Image (cartoon, rainbow, N blue to C red):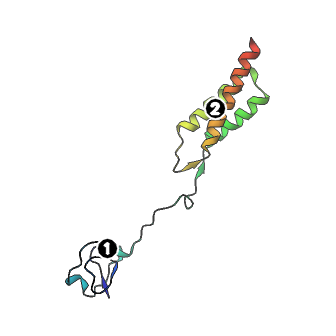
């Protein structure tokens, strides 16, 4: 049994190119060769399901403050704090390692709604 000198894939007899990497196979490389340990390393890229994403705590805090601001507005102060926390959460958001971006966006929207409601009540 022969292995490709470049990628370590098994080479079928009589082929001119490696099925693994596409490099030309010479008569020399068709001789049985023991593959190295490095050639057997199969770095599989991680899919989205394999990566456990962490929770964006600033986005969560902004979302919860946005919900609280609907009940306890305090002249728009809670809405402002909700916008700040949600904005910080959205600013540091990394889609590869974190999830729940919707919390940050919804926290900003709820905060803005509370601020506008407070301004309308003051007039």
Is the Cβ of the residue at disc 1 closer than 8 Å to that at disc 2?
Answer: no
Q: Position of residue 55 (x, y in %)?
A: 62, 48
Q: Position of residue 60 (x, y in %)?
A: 66, 41
Q: Secondary structure at mark 1?
A: loop
Q: Residue at x 66, y 28 (%)?
A: 81
- Residue 3 falls in image quadrant: bottom left
Q: Residue at x 31, y 71 (%)?
A: 21
Q: Quadrant of the N terminus?
A: bottom left
Q: Secondary structure at mark 2?
A: helix
Q: Position of residue 74 (x, y in %)?
A: 75, 22
Q: Position of residue 90 (x, y in %)?
A: 56, 37
Q: CA distance from mark 1 to mark 2?
A: 51 Å
Mark closest to the chain's N terminus, 1 or 2: 1
Image vertical order of residue 8 relative to residue 87, above or below: below
Name the residue beneath numbered marker 2.
Answer: 108
Residue 7: image tag: 1
User: Which residue occupies the foreground of this view, 39 or 21?
Assistant: 21
Q: Residues within 10 Å of mark 2 (few under 14, many from 20)?
A: many
Asked whether, in this view, residue 12 is left or right of residue 49, the answer is left
Return the residue found at the far top: 123
Image vertical order of residue 30 relative to residue 100, above or below: below
Asked whether, in this view, residue 54 is left or right of residue 116, the answer is left
Image vertical order of residue 79 relative to residue 25, above or below: above
């Amino acid at each position: 049994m022969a292995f490709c000198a470049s990628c370590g894939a098994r080479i079928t007899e009589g082929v001119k190119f490696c099925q693994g990497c596409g490099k030309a196979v010479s008569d020399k490389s068709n001789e049985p060769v023991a593959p190295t340990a490095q050639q057997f390393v199969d770095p599989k890229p991680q899919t989205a399901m394999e990566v456990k994403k962490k929770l964006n705590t600033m986005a969560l805090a902004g979302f919860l403050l946005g919900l609280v601001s609907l009940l306890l507005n305090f002249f728009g102060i809670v809405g402002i704090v909700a916008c700040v926390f949600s904005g910080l959460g959205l600013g540091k958001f990394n889609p590869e390692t974190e999830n729940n971006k919707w919390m940050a966006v919804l926290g900003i929207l709820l905060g803005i709604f509370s601020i506008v409601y407070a301004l309308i009540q003051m007039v």
